[in-house]
Structure formats: structure tokens, C-alpha cells
Image (cartoon, rainbow, N blue to C red):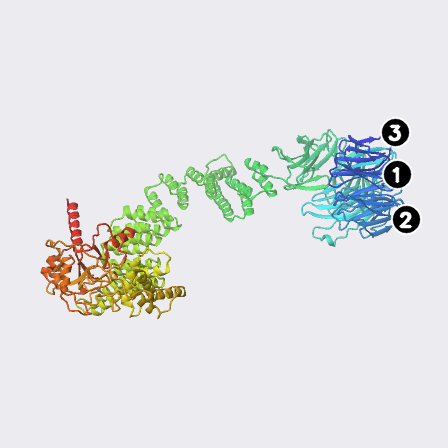
């Protein structure tokens, strides 16, 4: 049933003998405030307590309507004063607007917060976003209005009987016509339906329903009174209707009348559900305002796993708690009672009883018909309804009536007190049993086919709940004091029930249908579980228990059935602690994790309860443990049989006379079973090896402990028990340790064991297979000697495979294997170590420098690679590298590098050809090729300065240097083809430019004439043209101070000798400083053919005679007194003048020999006799030694000792001392060949050579001291 309980009420006092009427009311969206339109006041109540918070006086006449916005920020009121006032939630008026007629009703749009105010002639739409109120005319007075949930449709009820459906802007799109005034309408707020239904309360005393398209749903429902208000309740499941009958009645959403909720003294103008609560606010014409709590009684029935309960007052839902399948039966009438038994469902309606056959679990729900099998017209007022297979029972007062399914009353039982509870306990069809609890505390058991009830228990207080255990030997009773008492039922009529326990705070109880001694009860928000004599386990739970099956408890919380999974682990482990394994097994079958099953199996097996252990291991699917159970059973049966046979033999012989044969056999079986040894087997199988060994030792089976530890490779543990065994057993243990370690791939232990046994090679192979390089290295370093070649080679192989360079190196050093060590260095790219070792063992240089050179090539270290190829004897590869380097340098316009590489290439090629030809062979062609390559290297080195001068914006070269370089290049190349990359155009342009600036106008004109035959870059063309014009305006002559002089024949030469950079008179090739390219005062000579190079060097190294004092040198010894532009060559008297000026020493034999020559284009060096060599100063003599001795030596003498000259002995180029020192300070190397030079180098003369030898001797002497 549904009851209404008054929460609070208020009555507006009379004013001048008239009591104000309540016309309308509204709740705030959160349900905290209740706004009431009463008289001309707006009353604001606290919805929970009924406290009047505000009484607002904004209106001058009677109020008809109020409405609250969905956002809760404002509410509106309107009435007979034709005014609508909008208030804030804090009761502050913020806006007022008027109509031409009285305001009949108000409603806020639930989405847009716009307000609709309706009158007899129009309705207005107001929203906070707009100031004006949009009004729409109507033809009839509007009595009610309602918005749909989405705020898109507005329904207007008219006094004319029309219902106008409009959009949110007020446009009409549908009209529903009825014959009487429409006084109240309400859209169903549920969102579970496909569309919203409009409930219409009409003054033709009917309730009807329409969908949004205007189609009526169902027929009109007769009310019997004029309805004044209709509102949906409980999320649209019910309707509350009030009106002229002065009552509020409850209806289903389909229009089925359920019950009357409350009555008033006047017409009910307002009935409104409170949001979020099961409460209803009611206002009537008598001025009363009240809020009522609605209490819905739970109507349900339970039998085993099926639970039936009433839903929305007219439906019955059958719920299978195990399969969670739900079946809804629509009875279309008020359901008063429900009972269920197996597949039978009995439903009591106000005037009938319906019998249903429920589908079986295998029957699809869709294939089942929900029509009742029988409908019995029976209006009975009963306290309980119970169903069995072929009957149903009605409890009325102290009577229990038994009816057949056709409605025939078959039997009646009368008891001493009123019946408070009945519960079916099963049985055969037609002979089922029921428990009947009375208000006087008696509990009876009846059978439907037996007329006499059986008294089971006489409890001290009234019974409110009871249940019978699954074995029917225990009964639980809940009484009116909310105490649960468990009884053990007697097995005979003479015995009395025994109280097992009593617990307070219980409202419902249920035995476990699968465990006989387990029950649960609920109360005070707690769920309590009692098992045997164990302490109670409690946990929080909402609702009351209605069933207990296995590990699942079914609880009813209002109309919701919930399933609670109960943790039974605590009970399980309590049984295990008490070694009640059979009971623990029953609990584990209900709810146990894999860990719980394994724990139970383990403990049972340790207790040698093989039956329980076997069943657990079958559940776990662990065949190995099942085999252990079988092994234990077999061993115990065998030993028991032997014991029984021995006992029988002793009995037959008269031993142990006085005891029965059975007693002796049992005692013998107990002694011979050797449980301690069997427990050791179990412990070993469970991994408790130490405990197993102790058990075996206690049983005198130490060999089994040793065998177990050996199998487990627990050698230390095995040795602890081997002291009781023989020495042979201990030795066998060590052997087995090694064998097992290798068989089970425990290689670390195996290797250590092999080392102990002296099997070093086997240990090495094991360490190597494991990658234990550190152990291999330690073994080779500490345990192996140089004579252990096989072992060291094995270690070396594994270390090399593992890439352990340092360790492998130590092994090779210990072996003294130089080739192997070199190979190791090369494989690991340890070039410093490899080359150092190759220096110590030159016979293996090829094995090092070849791979080293290839690696250098990959690292772009071509210079080092070329050297390495040479050291490796791979001269062809070295030459190819030099060729590639030179070619790439030319292509990349690195001409200085190209010159350097060509010089190296020339030297390498010469040496390679000389080695191929052998000693004594003619090196003429090779020498020519060498000279040609060397000359080309000079060209590229010189051209690098010209290229920088023409292409770079800034240069450090002086004009004289550029002038000298271009003359050097053009003297050799002007009539021949220039090498790749050298441009004659660049040379001629630079020469013309510098010749013009230095006053060599004749040479400049010649350069420009030559330049005219070449293609000039467009950027230079204008400059070249200007040069040509300006040069033509100058004298056709060169400055005399620019003319070069041959230091051999003292002949003045032209600025540009197109036959080569040599003297036009004697053919002596000018020796230039390879920085500024100035001509150096060096004259080449040759010793007599009878003197060997060693003799020549010995003569020059001697101290020279004292020099004749010289006059100060003049700038141009060939200048004439006839004028600066006149030069004169004199072969007689002028030489004497030069001697007087200190330029020549005619008494010097070498000078005389030098001046004695025949003019020729082919140069013939003067021959120096031994006497001449003795007269030379060794600091003025320079000896050039070419890369190969077969090329001989070249001797040069500085004719002007005051002009310091330096010779680079690496590339055989001469330099001014200033140029040399500047380059050395910058780079610390020769400007041409980049050979490293330090401060102790000297000038490269014979004197410098002697100084170095003396310094080396002094250093050696100091080292010896």
C-alpha cells in the first residue's frame, strides 16, 4: 500500500472573516523552497521544515499563479491585478509588466528561461535578453499551460475545451478539441519513453492522454469529479490528481487509479511533487498548505533464486537472481500481493487473483505468453499470500486458507494467534510444507495435504521472520525485538529445540541454501554472517536480506534487489586452522580464489588428508600433485598391508596374546605407515625443502634428503647432511654436483667444479659459452702458465669472440705471439699500439700499415694514408692516393695543397720506379719525370698566390712578390701549355697590373698584348682596356732597377725570358725564394768527377781561410755613370770595378772559374776543385740531396753571404731568411712542404749540418754521463 505521512502544514489565517484560498504553488528546482500563491500574497516557505521565510506584498489583488525558473535564479507571480512580477530567489522584485486581463497562469521554459504569462485574451513571452514582452492574441481564456522537457513545445489549455500546441516563439501548429474546459495539463518528464505524453484533466470529469502530434493515447479515464490540478510524480511513473472531491489521488502514468492519498476540507487547487524527494505539496481552497511524505510499501515474493516484486503499482517483475534475467508482467490494475513458487506466480488484485505459469530457464522470454492461466474473482483482505505447486494460501488474522488454482477453498487452519509470517519450505507437489510464524511467538510447520499443524518452536516474542536450513535441522527466528535466534530442531518428538545462538539488531534472516551451518541476517545498515561457532563477520549493507545462496546474498533495498558477494575466505581459513578439511572444502566450493584452493590443498596434503587434497588439486588441474596423493595412498596401503600380515603372523605364533587381531593390526599399521617420511615427501613437493630434510632425518632416511638436495642443486644443504654418510657418498656428491650442474645448464657451478677437479679446459669452454670474459681473463692471468698453450689459445679464442681487447692482449703477450697481437690491434683499430709494435718488428709492418692506410682513407686522412701505404710497401696504392689528392686539390682550387701533393707524388714515383728498375739501372726517364713533376708542383704553389690575388678582395702579398711570381710562371708557361687549373689569363692580368704600378711599362704592354689573345672575364674587361690605354701613354721601357742580374755571369737579364726562368747568357736557372720569389745570390757548381760526395763534404766541412774584407755592396753593380737609363756590359775593366766595390773577389779561384764560360743557352755549372772547396765558407755552401741517391747531389754557393738564405732539406727549396722565419713563426713548418721546423733548424747549409751533429754528440755524451 501507499501511505502519506504529514511532514508539515500551515493554514493562512482569516482576514475580515474570509480565509484566503491557495490557488497555485511551485518548488524551486532544488526543492529547497516552496512558493505559494495565497490571497494577494506570495508566501515563501522552507520546503523541509515548513518555516515561513517571506510574505511578499507586491500584488494588489488575488494571486492566481506562480512559477519558478529552471535555473533557480528567479520566480514569477501573477493574478487578478493584471500584473506579472519577477522576483529573485532572495525575494527581491526586479521586473513588473502588465496585461489587459487578469493573469491566469505562468510557466518558465525549462531551456531558454523565457516566461509565458497567459490571460483571457492573450499570452506574453518574456525573456531576460529582451526588454519588450511579445504578446499573442487568443480567442478563449487560457486556464493552464505546460512546456515540454526540451522547451520546444508549449501546450495551452483553454476554457473553450481546446488545447493549443505552439512552438517556443508562440506560433500555433496544432489544436486538440474537447467538449469541456481544460483545467490542468502536464507533460510526462520521463526521458525513457520514445515521446512525451500530455496528461489532460478536463471538466467533463475525465483524464486523457495525447502525444505531441495530437493523437489521443488510450481512452478517457473517468474521474468522478472536476479536476483542478494534475502533476506527474516519481519521474513520470505516477500522476497526482486533485479537484472538487477534496482529495489527492494516485494514478499510474497510463491512467489506472491506484489509491487515494489524502483529503482536505476544500477543493484541492494545487498538488505538486517536491523535486528530488518522495514528498507532495498540497494547497486547497480552505487556505491549508501541507507537505506529505509518500511511503510505498514493498510487495514482493521470493522462492529460491526467483524473486517477484511489484513495480509502478500495476506491474510485476520476476527476477532470476542467478541468471539476472528479468520478466515484466503488466497486470493493468493495482497489485496488492505477490507470491512465487518454482514456476508458479500468484498475483492478488483488488477484486481478483491471477495465476501465471512462468517460463523455464530454457524457454526464451520472447516465446512466452504473459497471459494468466487462470483468473479467479476473489476480493480478499489478507495479510500474506503464499503460493505452492497446485495451491495458494491466504493468511487472514489467525486463519490460513488453502485454495486450489481454480479458486476452490480446500482447507483451513486456525491458530491461537494472528499469523505474522509464512514461508514455503518445499516438498512434493501437493504435499508442500510451510513455516507459519505467529504473533505469540509460536512457529508451526504445516503440510498442504495434512490438516494438523506441527509445533516446532515456542519463542518468547512475536515472530517477524523465519527460515529453515538446507538440511531442515536448524531454524532461525527474528522476533519483534529485532533479535535473531537459531534453534537446532529435535530429531525425535521427545526432545526439545536447542538454542544455538542469539544475536540482536536483526530485521531479516536467511540460511545458506548450500551450507547447512551458515546464515546471514541484516539490521541497522549491517550485514552479519554467522558460520558454525565462529565469530560473526559484519559489513555495511543497505536493505534487508531475502536470500543466501553460496557466496551470494540477495538484499532488497526498497524495490531494488541487489546481489552482494560475500568473502568467505575468513571462514575457510578458520576451518583450515581447526583441520576440519571437509568443512573447509564445502566453503571453498562456494567462493574461493585459486590461492585459497591451493592453501587448502597444501594443508590437507600435509595432514595426509589425501581425499580432500586430491579433490582440491583436481579443481586446480594440477596432475603432479594428484600423483603425489596417489603415491602417498599407495605407500600407506602397502605398508599397512605388510603391518597387518606381520601382526597376523605374530598372533598366530602367540605373540601379543590378550589383544584382538584387529587392535594389533591397527597398531601395526599406525607404526609402519611412517607418516613422518610421507610428510617429508609432501614438504619436498611443496618446495619446503629444509622442513622435508628434517622430517626425513627424523625418520632415519638421510639418503633421501641428500638425493633431494642433489636433484635441486642445493649442494651446500646436501653437504650439511652428508656428514652422517660415508666418505664415498661425500665424494659421489661432489661428482654429482658437477654432472648435474652441466646437465641442467648451471654452467657457473659446473665450471667452478671442473676447476676444482683439474679439468681446466672444460671450465674454459663453459666460461666461454657463458661469456664470462672476466673469469677467463683471471684464469689466464693467475692460473695458467706460458706452457699451457692449448688452454691459453682456448681462452684467447673466447676473448676475441667477445671483443675483449685488453684481456685478449694480455693473453697474447703471455704467449709471446707477435703476429697475433698485431692482428688484434688491427681488428680493434688500436693503431697507436699496432704501429708501435710494428716499429719493433719491421718484418710485420705490412700487416699493420696496409689496414691502417685503408682505415685512414675512410676517415678522410689522406696524407696519413699515403704515408701508411708507403710504410706498408703498397707503393702503387700510395701513388694513387697522391694522384687523387693532387687532382682533387686542383679541382677545389687549393693550389698550394696541389703543389705539395705533386711534390710528394714526384718523390714517391721516383722511389717506386727506382725500386722496380733495381740498383745500377738507368734512371734517366725516371729523373726526367721527377723533374717535370717537381717543376709542376712549383707552378701550382706559385699560382696559388696569383689566384688569391685575383679572386680574393684582400691579400698580404706585396706588389713586388706578385710581380716576381707572375714573371716566374710566365717565363716557363708563356710558350707552353699550362697545367690543369693554372690560368695564363690570371697570370698576364696580374703581371700587367703590377708591371704598370712598378714602372715596367714595356713588360706591361707585352703582357696586355698577350692578354688580348685570351678570353678575359667580363668583370676585368673595362680595367684591362684602361690599362692598355694608360700604358700606351708611357715610355716603352722598363725601370732599370727591376732588371734581374745573373749571379753567375753578372749579366743583366730582361724582365721576362720566354725561354725559361734562366740567364740569357749562361743559362743558369735562377734560384728564387719560394715566398717572395726574389732571385737569390746562389750559384750552382759541381765538384770534379774524381772527388766522391764524402770527400767533397769533408773538404767543405773544414774551417775556411780568412775572408778578404768587402766594400759595402751597391744596389746595382752594373749601373752606368752615363745616366740612370743607361746600362753597360763590360767584360774587362768593369769586373775590376766590381772587385773594387766588394761585389767580386777575383782572387778567389771559384770566382775565376765561374766567370770563365762560353755564352750558351745550355747551362754548364762551374767545376770546383778541391782547392776551391777548401776556400769556401761552409755556411755559404748548400747541398741538395734528392729522394734517391742515383740522382746525385746539387751544390750551391751563396755569392753574397750578407744576404741570408735558408734551405728546406725536406723539399729542397730556398728561402730568404726573413720569409722563412715569418712562415715558421706562423705555422712552425716549411711554407712549401709543411715539414715541421723548430728553432734549432738553422739555415740548411753545411755549417748548419755540422752544428746539428755537434749538438747530437753533446746530447749523447750528457746522456752517457
Q: In this rendering, which labeled residue sits more in front, label 2 or label 3?
A: 3
- Of residues 13 and 1233, the one drawn nearer to the viewer in this rendering: 1233
Image height of 1112 relative to 1027, above or below:
above
Label 1 and label 2: CA atoms lie apart by: 21 Å
**Residue 357 picture location, percent across and down:** 76, 49
Q: Earlier in the sequence, mark 1 or mark 2?
A: 2
User: Looking at the rendering, which quadrant does residue 64 occupy?
Assistant: top right
**Residue 538: x %, y % from top left:** 63, 34
For the residues labelled 1 and 3, the Cα–Cα distance comes to 26 Å
Q: Left or right: where does residue 899 sit relative to residue 341?
A: left
Quarter of the view holding residue 1076: bottom left
Kindly report the distance in space between the C-alpha atoms of the residues bearing marks 2 and 3.
38 Å
Give the residue number, with chain letter if any, for mark 2: 179
Q: Nearer the viewer, residue 501 or 97?
A: 97
Tell me, for residue 15, which label it has, or none: 3
The mark closer to the camera, 1 or 2, is 2
* Few, some or many residues within 10 Å of mark 1 (<14, 14–19, 20+): some
Residue 273 percent location from the top left of the image: 78, 39
Q: Is residue 853 above or below residue 164?
A: below
Residue that numbered label 1 is attached to: 245
Residue sitting at x 29%, y 61%: 999
Amino acid at each position: 500500500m501507499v501511505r502519506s505521512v504529514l511532514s508539515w502544514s500551515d493554514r493562512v489565517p482569516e482576514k475580515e472573516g474570509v480565509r484566503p484560498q491557495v490557488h497555485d504553488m511551485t518548488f524551486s528546482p532544488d526543492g529547497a523552497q516552496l512558493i505559494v500563491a495565497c490571497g494577494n500574497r506570495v508566501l515563501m516557505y522552507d520546503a523541509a521544515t515548513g518555516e515561513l521565510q517571506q510574505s511578499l506584498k507586491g500584488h494588489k489583488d488575488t494571486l492566481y499563479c506562480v512559477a519558478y525558473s529552471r535555473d533557480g535564479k528567479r520566480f514569477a507571480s501573477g493574478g487578478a491585478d493584471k500584473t506579472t512580477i519577477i522576483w529573485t530567489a532572495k525575494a527581491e522584485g526586479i521586473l513588473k509588466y502588465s496585461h489587459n486581463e487578469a493573469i491566469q497562469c505562468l510557466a518558465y521554459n525549462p531551456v531558454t528561461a523565457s516566461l509565458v504569462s497567459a490571460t483571457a485574451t492573450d499570452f506574453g513571452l518574456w525573456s531576460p535578453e529582451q526588454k519588450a514582452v511579445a504578446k499573442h492574441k487568443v480567442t478563449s481564456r487560457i486556464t493552464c499551460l505546460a512546456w515540454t522537457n526540451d522547451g520546444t513545445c508549449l501546450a495551452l489549455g483553454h476554457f473553450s475545451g481546446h488545447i493549443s500546441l505552439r512552438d517556443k516563439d508562440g506560433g500555433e501548429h496544432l489544436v486538440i478539441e474537447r467538449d469541456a474546459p481544460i483545467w490542468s495539463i502536464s507533460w510526462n518528464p520521463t526521458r525513457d519513453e520514445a515521446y512525451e505524453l500530455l496528461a489532460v484533466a478536463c471538466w467533463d470529469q475525465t483524464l486523457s492522454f495525447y502525444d505531441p502530434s495530437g493523437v489521443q493515447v488510450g481512452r478517457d479515464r473517468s474521474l468522478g469529479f472536476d479536476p483542478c490540478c494534475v502533476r506527474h510524480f516519481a519521474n513520470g511513473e505516477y500522476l497526482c490528481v486533485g479537484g472538487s472531491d477534496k482529495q489527492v489521488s494516485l494514478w499510474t502514468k497510463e491512467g489506472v487509479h491506484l489509491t487515494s492519498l489524502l483529503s482536505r476540507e476544500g477543493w484541492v487547487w494545487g498538488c505538486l511533487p517536491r523535486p528530488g524527494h518522495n514528498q507532495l505539496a498540497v494547497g486547497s481552497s480552505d487556505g491549508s498548505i501541507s507537505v506529505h511524505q509518500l511511503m510505498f510499501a514493498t510487495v514482493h515474493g521470493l522462492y529460491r533464486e526467483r524473486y517477484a516484486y511489484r513495480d509502478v503499482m500495476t506491474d510485476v517483475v520476476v527476477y532470476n537472481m542467478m541468471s539476472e534475467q528479468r520478466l515484466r508482467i503488466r497486470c493493468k490494475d493495482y497489485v496488492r500481493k505477490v507470491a512465487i513458487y518454482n514456476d508458479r506466480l500468484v498475483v492478488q488484485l483488488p477484486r481478483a487473483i491471477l495465476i501465471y505459469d512462468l517460463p523455464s530457464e530454457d524457454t526464451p522470454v520472447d516465446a512466452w505468453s504473459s497471459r494468466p492461466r487462470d483468473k479467479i474473482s476473489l476480493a480478499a483482505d489478507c495479510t500474506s499470500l503464499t503460493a505452492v505447486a497446485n495451491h495458494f494460501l491466504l493468511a487472514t488474522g489467525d486463519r490460513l486458507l488453502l485454495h486450489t488454482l481454480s479458486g476452490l477453498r480446500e482447507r483451513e487452519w486456525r491458530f491461537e494467534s494472528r499469523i505474522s509470517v509464512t514461508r514455503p519450505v518445499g516438498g512434493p507437489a501437493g504435499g508442500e510444507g510451510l513455516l507459519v510464524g505467529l504473533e505469540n511467538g509460536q512457529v508451526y510447520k504445516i503440510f498442504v495435504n495434512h490438516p494438523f499443524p506441527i509445533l516446532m518452536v515456542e519463542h518468547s516474542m512475536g515472530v517477524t521472520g523465519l527460515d529453515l536450513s538446507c538440511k531442515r535441522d536448524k531454524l532461525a527466528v527474528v522476533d519483534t525485538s529485532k533479535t535473531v535466534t537459531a534453534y537446532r530442531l529435535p530429531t525425535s518428538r521427545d526432545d526439545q529445540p536447542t538454542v544455538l545462538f542469539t544475536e540482536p539488531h536483526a530485521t531479516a534472516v536467511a540460511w545458506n541454501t548450500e551450507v547447512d551451518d551458515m546464515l546471514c541476517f541484516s539490521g541497522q545498515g549491517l550485514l552479519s554472517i554467522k558460520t558454525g561457532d565462529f565469530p560473526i563477520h559484519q559489513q555495511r549493507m543497505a536493505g534487508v536480506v531475502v536470500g543466501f545462496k553460496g557466496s551470494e546474498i540477495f538484499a532488497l533495498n526498497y524495490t531494488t534487489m541487489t546481489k552482494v558477494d560475500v568473502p568467505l575466505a575468513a571462514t575457510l581459513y578458520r576451518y583450515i586452522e581447526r583441520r576440519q578439511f571437509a568443512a573447509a572444502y564445502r566453503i571453498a566450493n562456494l567462493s574461493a580464489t585459486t590461492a585459497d584452493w591451493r592453501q587448502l590443498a597444501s594443508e590437507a596434503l600435509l595432514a595426509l588428508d589425501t581425499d580432500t587434497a586430491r579433490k582440491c588439486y583436481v579443481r586446480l588441474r594440477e596432475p603432479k600433485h594428484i600423483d603425489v596423493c596417489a603415491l602417498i595412498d599407495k605407500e600407506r596401503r602397502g605398508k599397512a598391508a605388510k603391518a597387518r600380515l606381520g601382526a597376523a603372523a605374530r598372533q598366530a605364533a602367540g605373540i601379543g596374546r590378550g589383544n584382538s587381531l584387529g587392535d594389533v593390526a591397527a597398531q601395526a599399521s599406525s607404526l609402519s605407515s611412517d607418516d613422518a617420511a610421507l610428510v617429508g615427501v609432501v614438504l619436498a613437493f611443496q618446495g619446503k625443502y629444509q622442513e622435508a630434510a628434517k622430517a626425513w632425518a627424523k625418520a632415519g632416511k638421510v639418503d633421501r634428503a641428500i638425493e633431494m638436495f642433489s636433484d635441486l642443486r642445493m649442494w651446500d644443504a646436501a653437504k650439511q647432511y652428508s656428514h652422517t654418510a660415508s666418505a664415498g657418498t661425500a665424494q659421489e656428491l661432489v661428482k654429482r654436483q658437477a654432472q648435474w650442474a652441466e646437465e641442467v645448464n648451471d654452467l657457473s657451478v659446473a665450471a667452478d667444479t671442473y676447476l676444482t677437479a683439474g679439468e681446466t679446459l672444460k671450465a674454459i669452454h663453459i666460461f666461454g659459452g657463458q661469456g664470462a670474459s672476466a673469469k677467463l681473463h683471471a684464469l689466464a692471468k693467475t692460473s695458467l702458465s706460458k706452457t699451457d698453450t692449448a688452454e691459453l689459445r682456448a681462452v684467447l679464442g673466447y676473448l676475441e669472440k667477445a671483443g675483449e681487447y685488453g684481456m685478449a692482449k694480455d693473453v697474447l703477450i703471455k704467449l709471446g705471439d707477435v703476429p697475433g697481437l698485431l692482428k688484434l690491434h688491427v681488428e680493434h683499430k688500436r693503431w697507436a699500439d699496432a704501429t708501435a709494435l710494428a716499429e719493433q718488428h719491421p718484418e710485420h709492418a705490412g700487416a699493420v700499415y696496409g689496414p691502417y692506410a685503408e682505415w685512414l682513407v675512410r676517415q678522410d686522412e689522406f696524407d696519413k694514408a699515403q704515408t701508411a701505404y708507403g710504410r706498408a710497401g703498397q707503393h702503387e696504392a700510395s701513388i694513387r692516393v697522391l694522384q687523387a689528392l693532387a687532382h682533387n686539390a686542383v679541382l677545389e682550387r687549393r693550389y698550394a695543397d696541389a703543389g705539395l701533393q705533386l711534390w710528394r707524388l714526384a718523390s714517391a714515383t721516383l722511389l717506386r720506379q727506382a725500386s722496380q728498375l733495381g740498383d745500377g739501372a738507368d734512371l734517366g726517364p725516371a729523373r726526367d719525370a721527377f723533374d717535370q713533376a717537381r717543376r709542376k708542383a712549383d707552378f701550382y704553389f706559385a699560382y696559388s698566390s696569383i689566384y688569391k690575388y685575383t679572386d680574393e678582395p684582400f691579400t698580404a702579398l706585396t706588389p713586388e712578390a706578385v710581380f716576381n711570381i707572375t714573371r716566374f710562371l710566365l717565363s716557363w708557361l708563356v710558350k707552353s701549355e699550362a697545367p690543369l687549373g693554372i690560368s695564363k689569363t690570371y697570370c698576364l692580368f696580374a703581371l700587367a697590373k703590377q708591371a704598370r704600378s712598378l714602372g715596367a711599362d714595356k713588360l706591361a704592354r707585352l703582357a696586355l698584348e698577350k692578354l688580348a689573345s685570351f678570353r678575359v672575364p667580363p668583370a676585368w674587361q673595362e680595367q684591362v682596356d684602361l690599362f692598355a690605354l694608360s700604358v700606351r701613354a708611357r715610355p716603352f721601357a722598363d725601370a732599370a732597377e727591376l732588371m734581374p742580374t745573373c749571379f753567375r755571369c753578372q749579366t743583366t737579364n730582361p724582365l721576362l725570358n720566354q725561354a725559361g726562368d734562366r740567364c740569357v747568357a749562361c743559362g743558369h736557372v735562377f734560384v728564387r725564394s719560394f715566398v717572395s720569389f726574389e732571385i737569390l745570390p746562389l750559384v750552382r757548381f759541381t765538384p770534379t768527377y774524381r772527388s766522391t760526395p764524402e770527400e767533397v763534404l769533408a773538404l767543405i766541412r773544414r774551417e775556411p781561410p780568412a775572408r778578404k774584407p768587402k766594400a759595402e755592396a751597391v744596389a746595382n753593380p752594373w749601373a752606368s755613370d752615363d745616366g740612370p737609363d743607361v746600362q753597360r756590359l763590360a767584360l774587362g775593366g768593369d769586373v775590376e770595378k766590381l772587385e773594387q766595390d766588394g761585389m767580386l773577389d777575383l782572387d778567389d779561384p771559384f770566382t775565376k772559374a765561374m766567370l770563365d764560360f762560353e755564352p750558351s743557352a745550355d747551362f754548364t755549372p762551374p767545376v770546383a776543385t778541391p782547392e776551391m772547396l777548401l776556400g769556401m765558407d761552409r755556411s755559404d755552401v748548400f747541398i741538395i740531396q734528392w729522394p734517391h741517391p742515383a740522382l746525385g747531389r746539387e751544390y750551391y754557393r751563396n755569392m753574397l753571404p750578407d744576404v741570408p738564405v735558408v734551405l728546406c732539406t725536406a723539399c729542397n727549396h730556398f728561402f730568404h731568411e726573413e720569409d722563412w722565419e715569418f712562415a715558421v713563426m706562423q705555422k712552425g713548418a716549411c711554407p712549401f712542404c709543411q715539414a715541421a721546423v723548430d728553432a734549432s733548424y738553422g739555415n740548411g747549409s753545411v755549417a748548419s749540418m755540422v752544428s746539428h751533429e755537434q749538438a747530437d754528440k753533446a746530447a749523447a755524451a750528457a746522456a752517457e754521463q
